[in-house]
Image (cartoon, rainbow, N blue to C red):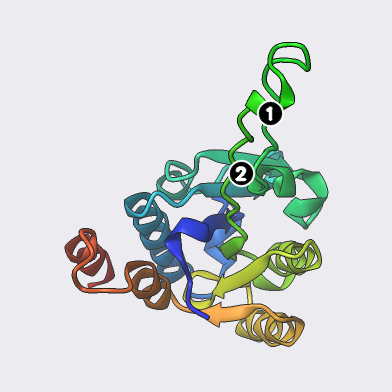
Amino acid sequence: MLLDASQSQLVLVDYQAQLMPAIFEADAVAQNAVRLGKMARLFEVPVWGTEHNPSKLGENVPDIRALCQRTLSKMHFSGMEEGLGEWLRVPAKAPQGNARSLPKHLQKPAAAAEERNMIVIAGCEAHVCLLQTALDLLEDEFEVWVVTDACSSRTERNRDAAFDRLAGAGAELVTTEMVGFEWLRTAEHPAFAEVLKLIR
C-alpha cells in the first residue's frame, strides 16, 4: 500500500531544544523533519507537533515548530494519552436545524467528513515518546508510517530497537524521500519540482 496525501497527517514528536544536542545524528534528523513539514504543506497535509515537558526540555526547534498547525504540550510519553487522537480524528458535524425545520424527506444528508487515517510520524526519542505514541496510534486503528531518517534517540541501539518493535507491531517503516514520492505519485504532479528541491 502506498501513502496517499489526501488521507495523510504528519506528526512531529519532541524535536526539543534541550533534547536535540544529545540525539544521535541530530542535525540530519532535524533537517529531514523540516523537509517532511515543508512537503506536507505542499500537499495540504495537516502537520501536528508534540513537546514533552517543555518547561524542562524547551519548545521544539523553531524551524520545526513553525511548520506545525498546533503543538501539544504533554507529560505522558505518548501524545495519545493527552489528546493527540482528538486532533487527528475528524470531528463529527453537528446536525443543522431541528426536527421541525424541514420534513425528513426534504433534509439533505450530512456530507461525510474526510478521514485522514494515514499517520506519518517522526521524532525523538524513538524508543520512548515516538514509540509509545506510534503504538497507541496503532491500537486506536490508525495506519502508522514511521519516517526512520527523521527519527532518533540518544543512542543508535535504542533507535534501532524502536524500529524493530514498531515494524513487528504493524507500523510501516519509510524514509523522507519515500514519503515525498508516494505523496507525488507522478512526475506530472504540480509539486514535483518543489519536492525535488527539498530532497536534493
The location of residue 19, given as percent across then percent down, is 60, 57
Which residue is outermost to the top? Answer: 101
Residue type for callout 1: His
The location of residue 123, given as percent across then percent down, is 58, 63
Q: Quadrant of the C terminus?
A: bottom left
Above or below 163: residue 43? above
Task: Tell which of 77 and 59 is nearer to you.
Answer: 77
| Label of residue 105 in the image | 1
Q: Callout 2 environment at 10 Å: few (<14), some (14 to 19), or many (20+)?
A: few
Q: Quadrant of residue 36?
A: bottom left
Above or below 153: residue 40? above
The residue sitting at 64% across, 43% down in the picture is 90
| Label of residue 152 in the image | none
Classify mark 1: helix, strand or loop: helix
Taking 192 as reference, is 14 left or right? Answer: right
Taking 7 as reference, is 99 left or right? Answer: right
Taking 32 as reference, is 48 left or right? Answer: right
Classify mark 2: helix, strand or loop: loop
The location of residue 180, given as percent across then percent down, is 36, 69
Which residue has dot 2 on it?
Answer: 112
How many badges with numbers are in the image? 2
Any part of residue 103 in sight: yes
Taking 103 as reference, is 147 left or right? Answer: left
Residue type for callout 2: Ala
Q: Quadrant of residue 158?
A: bottom right
